[in-house]
Amino acid sequence: DAGVIQSPRHEVTEMGQEVTLRCKPISGHDYLFWYRQTMMRGLELLIYFNNNVPIDDSGMPEDRFSAKMPNASFSTLKIQPSEPRDSAVYFCASSSRGWDEKLFFGSGTQLSVL
Amino acid sequence: SQQGEEDPQALSIQEGENATMNCSYKTSINNLQWYRQNSGRGLVHLILIRSNEREKHSGRLRVTLDTSKKSSSLLITASRAADTASYFCATEANDYKLSFGAGTTVTVRA
């Protein structure tokens, strides 16, 4: 398996633009997580899915953020409109048994909002 | 919010030396995990230790867990240049979420 695949690797956009980050989890994994990493706040859980259903989105900072998982092999995280404070590295991770087992992380998307 | 806090924030050692870093947490946990992150990359899982375990080994890694002190330690023996990375502890508490600490940056000098 190729692991968790995220795209794009880097994204530079202007304030107010819509940004869509994409993730393909490892096949067979029922859990998918979106994390955000910044120097100031470290790694923060934004939202996680179990069997394509959002379970906890309490970490999503604002209504500008939304996430979907239309099927078991694809998820998106959308920011609309984007703001400079959204600049961070966004990671997608997946696991087969949720928190009780190790998470497999993608390489992340480095987002810069100018 | 960060449940685990790593100590020290940064560590510089000579190749071949051992590196020890600690993680303290605030509430009861179900398990504790250690991850490594190389610069510009995603996190890689190293070890998971459950609340009823006291010690686990994996290759040159040794993890201990003291639930009475709410702390864990990660020991890397005979360090190599390739061990240069940031190391994070992550705790699963009763809110069933995995919370990561701020990390320890380890630099192994040749």
Image: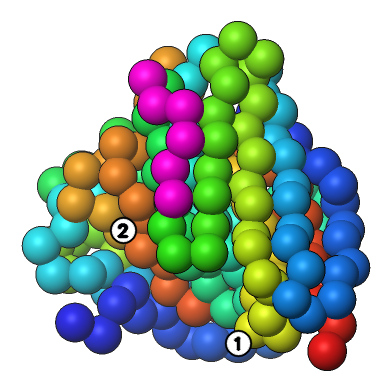
Q: Nearest the camera: B45 or A81?
A: B45
Q: Is residue A110 left or right of residue A63?
A: right
Using the image, tell me which numbered label, if any, was put on residue A67.
none
Residue B2 sits in quarter: top right
The figure's colour scheme reads: rainbow
Quadrant occupied by the C terminus of chain A: bottom right
* Region of the chain picked out in magenta, as a range: B52-57
Please state the horizontal and vertical placement of residue B99, each as a whole percent of the image: 56, 37
Give the residue at the far left of this rendering. Answer: A28
Residue at 49% x, 78% y: name it.
A107
Look at the image and say whether residue B18 sits in the magenta stretch. no
Residue B58 sits in quarter: bottom left
Residue A49 visible in the current orientation: no
Residue designated by label 2? A94
Residue designated by label 1? A10
Residue at 64% x, 19% y: name it.
B70
Please state the horizontal and vertical placement of residue A96, each as a whole percent of the image: 19, 51
Q: Nearest the camera: B65 or A68?
A: B65
- Quick check: B47 above or below A110? above
Kind of residue at disc 1: His
